[in-house]
Amino acid sequence: MPLSPSVIKSLKYIVGPDNCLDSKEDMACYAYDTTPDFKLPDAVVFPKTAQEVSAILDLANQKRFFVTPRGAGTGMTGGSVPARGGVVLAMTRFDRILEIDIDNMVAIVQPGVITGRFQKAVEEKGLFYPPDPSSAAVSTLGGNAAECAGGPRAVKYGVTRDYVLGLEVVLPTGEIVKTGVKTAKGVAGLDLTRLIIGSEGILGVITQLTLRLLPQPEAVGTLTAVFDTIGGAACAVCSIMRSGIIPRTLEYMDQAAVLCVENHLHAGLPVDAGAVLLIEVDGSTAEVSGVSARLASLLAAENAREVRTAGQGIEADLLWKARKTISPALFTYAPDKLNEDIVVPKSRIPDMVLRVAELSRKTGLTMVSFGHAGDGNIHVNIMYDRADADQREAAQKAVDAVFDYTLALGGTITGEHGVGTTKAAYLKHEISPPALALMKRIKTAFDPKGILNPGKIFDG
Amino acid sequence: MPLSPSVIKSLKYIVGPDNCLDSKEDMACYAYDTTPDFKLPDAVVFPKTAQEVSAILDLANQKRFFVTPRGAGTGMTGGSVPARGGVVLAMTRFDRILEIDIDNMVAIVQPGVITGRFQKAVEEKGLFYPPDPSSAAVSTLGGNAAECAGGPRAVKYGVTRDYVLGLEVVLPTGEIVKTGVKTAKGVAGLDLTRLIIGSEGILGVITQLTLRLLPQPEAVGTLTAVFDTIGGAACAVCSIMRSGIIPRTLEYMDQAAVLCVENHLHAGLPVDAGAVLLIEVDGSTAEVSGVSARLASLLAAENAREVRTAGQGIEADLLWKARKTISPALFTYAPDKLNEDIVVPKSRIPDMVLRVAELSRKTGLTMVSFGHAGDGNIHVNIMYDRADADQREAAQKAVDAVFDYTLALGGTITGEHGVGTTKAAYLKHEISPPALALMKRIKTAFDPKGILNPGKIFDG
């Protein structure tokens, strides 16, 4: 049901006529994320203040229309797609870093700030914001918080959740509330902050974040190791984790991923290798050199074909570029992909990796796996052609098999991408009926009229 | 209203007659925690399984009686006191460490396991469970999780929340649910795990915890620094935090605390000092020695009267014993204390410390402050005699003044002890009416009949 002219008029009154789009051409850019989902909204508004967001949500409750908040639209599971139409709340004008408090190592930011821009801003002051999702160059801090984004550094530093101390949030009922604290600790009342982090925009609209920062590590060292087989690389990952060393990243790419990136970048990557590990360690200069040496001998003992210790110069940059290029470069294999981000206990990575290889052989579909080996978070990409009914069915069955095996190993169907629309049908395989019913009651406690970001998580 | 004989009979049927107490003499031990609160329950039951807990909560919903879960009863804010009578659910028989998975650095435990026992068990396997509340020798992992206990190591390692990956919880409505994951990451559905952590036993009864572990650090170094004034010590804390060093603990004791402990232990502590800092660093052996040296010169530059680097032997043990003795030893000053655990931004510690000294002068009451300087978490203890009406009033006014100033500085009224009964009246100073109303709606979503742990947090 399209919005009535009087609602459009009210929206334009709230945000100003220049900050409301309602032509199809303009709105098409706000109809999708990185999933195949596409749904045109009925209007796109660009509020500038929490008060404007509050007025829009008030109106939505009165006039009964849906509102879907949106950062940069880089989500992997449809979280920012207006699944049932209504208004897209584009938060891009909330783009200010309000404060970087060096003494207390805390920053106050608006949700539309680009993550990469914020990382640079704090680094210039000798500080460090560890969360580093691969989308950091374009994604926003608000979107990262809504999805509880992870990224390669989670193995040592944790995820977005671990760096959000407090929020300003507009509740679906229109009230503007502050949650959490500005201090290192705080337990007053129920933990609304962490309930909202990772709730995929269904419980409130984040309008401000208080973020915890760390001192910038003195040095970072990078190592790469090339293995003949993916199983060999997976075993090396287990040995590293067992050794007591906690690298800040421990990424892997399988052969299909390496080949794909090499075709794209011509970086001289070893295309005949079964798998490549990309490892970063940080700390004091002495520590980095000591740990790097220990890692290098450990990797050699695990039969790595080649181990290289890269400096912080162009070489490490190139490897990271390769790692961050995989996701978009995959489309050279096939026009469509199903991108999952399962997590398994670290010791079960070899089992999962072999299972994916077996599924690929069986279905004839290219399956590329890469990701955050250090925390068992594997991005399994199943490449297929949606126009081909057989491939479509085979791909879907492969996803089912991957999820079933993940849960059988004691894992989870999503480590950092969320459930959104694309995994909503699978959530019940992981979460029991009474827990799901409780989540729905919590949603109702926040949003009695169900106006905020419908069609997601358990409302598929 | 006492429980009917038929309810007592049903309780005995559920847990077995030996696991249900209903005589006043027996129940007196389950009527209090470390606060002055004392309230006899109508029965104390000792369930052994989640199914038994579920049956008790089912019965409570049918027969309308209150249930208050209890670990070791070491809480600081009345969380385990049966404020409105009913049944105390003593979780002490849930005392098994079910699994320590070395490869995945994860443990599965029951909630009645004593924290200190668990720490030792994982250390024997080369692993490390960082949360270390001062009560660790007697408190339980379940109680730690319910209160989101902190402790000295939080400055580097975070609090209990940061080590709980998943839970088994019996909801107030009787369903047994699993929340969270067993893996390093996971974002499937709303974050029930972290909503329940720190909810002070009002949202569910924890019957199992999946805990994250770290590799044991190779070495730990301890430093002490003696300052002529508390202001000087507070400035040194700021300098340390600004230097980029993250010690694993950064504790301070003011003069009154040092004096009090010395009278108790005769350990040769400097009783004429304005304040003492107790610092631990950990990491590789080389790192610990390098950082210790840097800290020692930094402390000297900050005009420490004396800086000592202790080994890991008896000296460090003695200092920690002193630190952990403060809380009980304080009663030599006065028969009663009001013990607050405010947090202020680290840079404002000097302001807060001076304010407490001023309040002590004004009121004539001994005020002892000590705590986790590294994260701005100050335990302010106001010593008084409850039997003296003037002292009682002065003490209460001093608490009001401390809380007002804390909030004015951007702090929180509780860093790790929770709200419980003792701070319930103050919560509205920190949390706004719409946020409080939302918390109450969430409580209702979990516990529609309000049977679990009433009279706490916002139900004062």
Image: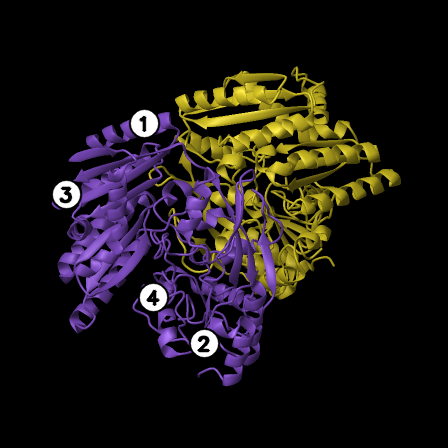
Chain colours: A purple, B yellow
From the viewer's perspective, is B411 left or right of A200? right
Q: Which residue is mark 1?
A: A289
Instruction: Give the residue pinned by disc 3.
Output: A270
Q: Chain of mark 1?
A: A
Q: In the image, which is nearer the foreground, mark 4 or mark 3?
A: 3
In the displayed structure, A241 sits above or below B295; it is: below
For disc 4, the marked residue is A422
The answer to whether residue B109 is seen in the rendering is no
Q: Position of residue A317 (x, y in %)?
A: 27, 42
Between disc 4 and disc 3, whose residue precedes?
3
Which label sits in the foreground, 2 or 4? 2
Determine whether the residue tagged by mark 1 lies in a helix, strand or loop.
Answer: helix
Q: Residues within 10 Å of mark 3 (few under 14, many from 20)?
A: some
**Quadrant where the C terminus of chain B lies?**
bottom right
Please name the amino acid that badge 3 sits on.
Pro
Q: Is residue A59 above or below residue A95?
A: below
Give the CA separation, mark 4 to mark 3: 34 Å
> SS for tag 3?
loop
Q: Secondary structure at mark 2?
A: loop
Q: Are marks 4 and 1 in contact (CB under 8 Å)?
A: no
